[in-house]
Amino acid sequence: MDILNLHPATIKSLKNGHPWITKDKYSKHFPDRPVLKIKDAKTGNFLGHFINDPNHPKVKARFWGQEVILFQKELLKRLWVALEKRKPILSERENVYLVFGEGDGLPGLFVQVFGDNLLIGYQAFFWQEHLKEIASFFRRKLKVQNIWVQKRIPGEKKAAPVALKGELTPQFTVKEGDLTFNLKFNQGHDVGLYTDMAAIREQLSAYFYNADSILNLFSYTGAFSLMGLKREKKVTSVDLSKTYMSWLEENIEINNFKNVDHTSIVGPCAKVINKLDQKFDLIISDPPSFSTDGKKRTSSLDFYKKELKNILGLLNEDGHLIIFLNTHSVSRRKFKNTIQELIGRDKMIRDIYLSKDCPILKNFPEGDYLKGLIIKKTGPLHS
C-alpha cells in the first residue's frame, strides 16, 4: 500500500470521477513504481490503483481501478472489451479507434486501425513497456499486417509514426464509407485523416445531400470536401498549407469522381473569407487549436469571435454553418455561450459530440476536446 499525501483539490477531483493526478508539490514525491496502490495519508481512504508516470510533464498518475488486479490479465481483458465494442463499426469503415484512452479504461492509450495498418499512440510513458503485448493482441484478433507506434506526449516535439512490425509501406489508402483517402505515415505527426471525426462525418451527411454549394474552411486533406464532391456539389476548399491542399487534390483524384466542381484556395482563412464574393448553402469550419496567417498566431475561439459574423455573411438564407473547436482548454459551455453571444440562441440547431469509437468519460473535460455546433441562418444577426 502506498500511503501518500495528496493535494486537497486532487482528492476532490478523484472523488468526482476525474482519472488523473497531475503534477504538484505532492505528486513529485510519488514512488517510482509502475503501478501505485494509493491510500490518502490524511484521511486513510483508499483511492485505488494508478498507473504511475513519473517522467510525464503534467500527469503523474492515471486511475486504473479499485480492486486488486493482476495488471497483465486486466490489460488484455480491457483490450478485448474495447475491441468487441468496435466490431460493428469495423464493418462500416476501415479507420476506427479501437482504444480511446480514458474512455475505454485504458488511460493515455489510443489504438487506431487503418485497413491492414495498426497505429498505437500513447500519451503516457507507462505504455512504452507494453507496446509489444498490445501489438500482439491486435495482431492475433484482427490479422493486421503492419504495426506502427506514435508517441504523443504533451510538450514534446510531435513525431511521425514509427514502424514496430511488418513490411511497412508508409503511404497507403483507406476506405471510409464510399470515400477513399490517401494516408501518409512519413509526412509528420498528422497522417491525413482524423479518425475521431469519422462518426461525426457520418452524422452530418444529410447536410451535404441538401446543399448545392459548400465552403470548407481549414480543409486539411479534404474529408468534408470529398463528402460534397461525391454528391456532385460545388465545393470550395480553403487552407493555409500548400502541402495539405496538394494532398486534398490527390484525394480527389484517387476517388475518380465523375463531375468535379472544386476550387482550391491556399491562404489564411480569415483573409479569404473577406475576399470571397459568393454565397454557400453549407459552410464547415474546423480550425486547429491555434491557426496562423503566416505572421500572427490566433486561437480558434478568438478566430470565431472575430470572423463568425463574416462567415455567416457568406451563407445563404436557411443555409447551415457547422463549426468545431478542437481543444480541451475551453469548456463546451464557454464555447457555446461565446457563440450565442455573437449570433443568438435561436440560430443553434444542436451540439456535436465525439461518439461511437471515441467514448467520452464523464467528469473528464480533457476527453471532451472536440466540440461542434450546427447553426442555421434564419434572420438578422445580433448587433
Image (cartoon, rainbow, N blue to C red):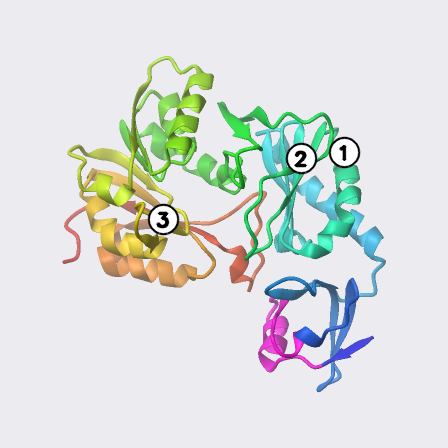
In this rendering, does residue 292 appear at all? yes
- For the view shown, which residue lies furthest in the bottom direction? 42
Query: Looking at this view, is 205 or 310 the one in front?
Result: 310
From this view, report whether residue 377 is shown above or below residue 62: above
Which residue is under mark 3?
Answer: 291
Residues under numbered marks 1 and 2 in contact, where contact means CB atoms less than 8 Å apart: yes
Kindly identify the amino acid type of the residue bearing the numbered disc 1.
Arg
Quadrant housing the N terminus: bottom right
Residue 327 in the image: x percent, y percent?
45, 55
The residue drawn where x is 39% and y is 23% is 249
The residue drawn where x is 17% and y is 52% is 381
On whether residue 10 falls in the magenta region, the answer is: yes
- For the view shown, which residue lies furthest in the top direction? 258
Which residue is under mark 2?
Answer: 118
- Magenta residues span 5-27
Classify 10 Å Cα crowding around label 2: few (below 14), some (14-19), many (20 and above). Answer: many
Kindly identify the amino acid type of the residue bearing the numbered disc 2.
Leu
Residue 142 in the image: x percent, y percent?
73, 31
Classify 10 Å Cα crowding around label 1: few (below 14), some (14-19), many (20 and above). Answer: some
Which of discs 3 and 2 lies nearer the camera? The answer is 3
Check disc 2 and report its element: helix, strand or loop: strand
From this view, report whether residue 156 is shown above or below residue 9: above
